[in-house]
Image (cartoon, helix red, strand yellow):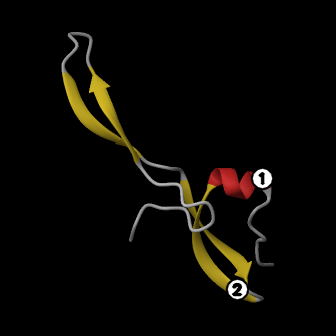
Amino acid sequence: MAKMCEICGKKPLAGHNISHAHNVSKRRFNPNLQRVRAISNGRMKKMMVCTNCIKSGNVVKAP
């Protein structure tokens, strides 16, 4: 399963771990995804959604 928000399309970003000695290694910044029961197209569906979409109200949670 892709680590991607089904609403806004937010994906992991690439960056670096930098130690005190300035040794650099690659790392990933993953979005904060939550599995939510949401209503989409009038039906209840389980979706992987980022917390920013949940907070902003872009997702209508199922009762």
Dot 1: within a 10 Å radius of its alpha carbon, few (fewer than 14), some, or many (20 or more) residues? few
Residue at the image point whose x is 54% and y is 61% from the top: 9
Dot 2: within a 10 Å radius of its alpha carbon, few (fewer than 14), some, or many (20 or more) residues? some
Location of residue 24 by image quarter = top left
Above or below — where is 49 with respect to 40? above
The kind of residue on which mark 2 rests is Met
Residue at the image point whose x is 42% and y is 50% from the top: 12
The kind of residue on which mark 1 rests is Ser
On the rendered structure, is 33 left or right of 37?
left
Instruction: Single out the mark in the foreground, 2 or 1.
Output: 1
Residue of label 2: 44
Tell how many labels.
Answer: 2
Provide the secondary structure element on which disc 2 rests: strand
Residue at the image point whose x is 71% and y is 81% from the top: 40
Residue 56 circle label: 1
Q: Position of residue 39 (x, y in %)?
A: 74, 80
Residue 20 circle label: none
What is the spatial separation of the Cα atoms under label 2 and label 1, in whole angstroms?
A: 20 Å
Above or below — where is 45 with respect to 4? below
Q: Position of residue 49 (x, y in %)?
A: 60, 63
Residue at the image point whose x is 78% and y is 88% from the top: 42
Q: Quadrant of the C terminus?
A: bottom right
